[in-house]
Amino acid sequence: MAFVEELKPWVRDVYDVDIVVCPPFTALSSVKRAIADSQIKLGGQNLHWEKEGAYTGEISAAMLVDAGCGYVIIGHSERRQYFGETDALVNKKIKAALLHQLVPIVCVGETLEQREAGVTRTICDRQVRRALVDLKPEQVASLVIAYEPVWAIGTGRTATAADAQDVIAYIRQVVADVAGSVAAEAVRIQYGGSVRPDNIDELMAQADIDGVLVGGASLKPDSFGSIVNYKRN
């Protein structure tokens, strides 16, 4: 609550950037009330793939919508690493989100071991293709895809802007191969991995980077607000 109250003045005059905060489930309803008079939008950090059923402790898409969400993060590297989420499960969750008019923020990316093995493109190719199975081109066009190299999350290490552009341009090619050039042009592809106020300008100057998925730097209103305002810095 305190965070969004401090953030609102930072983004009061920003109308050309979609700003989304994704707090824990227990804070969703409270944050929704706090951002009601702002252009900040609300997202969940995860969801269950079934509409309903005996899944104690899980949060459905309908529950997120009821709490005021318009977005949901799917397949975050921590979900994949610690909770065993597979590409097939990510695909199910995307479909569940779309069924309830939630915008999926679909995370893909390689580990340090995979990067050092030179298989970054192979990993991203596989994750993107499997995430998009059985989706219509117009559904793909409505997605947000976040390229988050796992080795750059919370480590202070950041892919260079050129490296991020290279992988994201490749991801866009994969989307085009799966869903067509119109969908590939429309889909928003973000970079996530130690995004900070001091590297946002260079990242956003790249041709294929449409936005950022901000981790640690989003925990302070002035830091996140500065990133949102990158074109005005």
Image (cartoon, grey):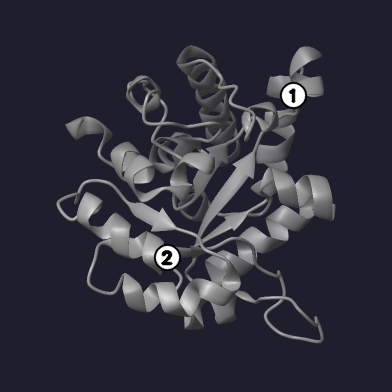
Question: Which SS class for mark 2?
Answer: strand
Q: Quadrant of residue 127?
A: top right
Image quarter of the N terminus: bottom left
The answer to whether residue 154 is seen in the rendering is yes
Q: Nearer the viewer, residue 207 or 23?
A: 23
- Give the amino acid type for the residue marked by disc 1 in the picture: Thr
* Residue ID for mark 1: 122
**Taking the image as drawn, is residue 118 in sight?**
no
Specify the quadrant of the image occupied by residue 34.
bottom left
Residue 124 in the image: state x and y as whole percent: 68, 30
Q: Which residue is at the far right?
A: 84
Please name whichever residue, 47 or 32, is drawn nearer the observer in this view of the structure. 32
Element under label 1? helix
Q: Quadrant of residue 73?
A: bottom right
Q: Position of residue 82 (x, y in %)?
A: 82, 50
In the image, taking residue 163 as reference, residue 186 lies left or right, namely: left
* Rendered location of residue 199, percent (x, y): 40, 23
What residue is rendered at 58% in x and 66% in y? 24
Q: Which residue is mark 2?
A: 42
Nearest the viewer among 51 and 32 is 32
Q: Quadrant of the C terminus?
A: top left
**Residue at screen point 82% across, 86% down:** 54
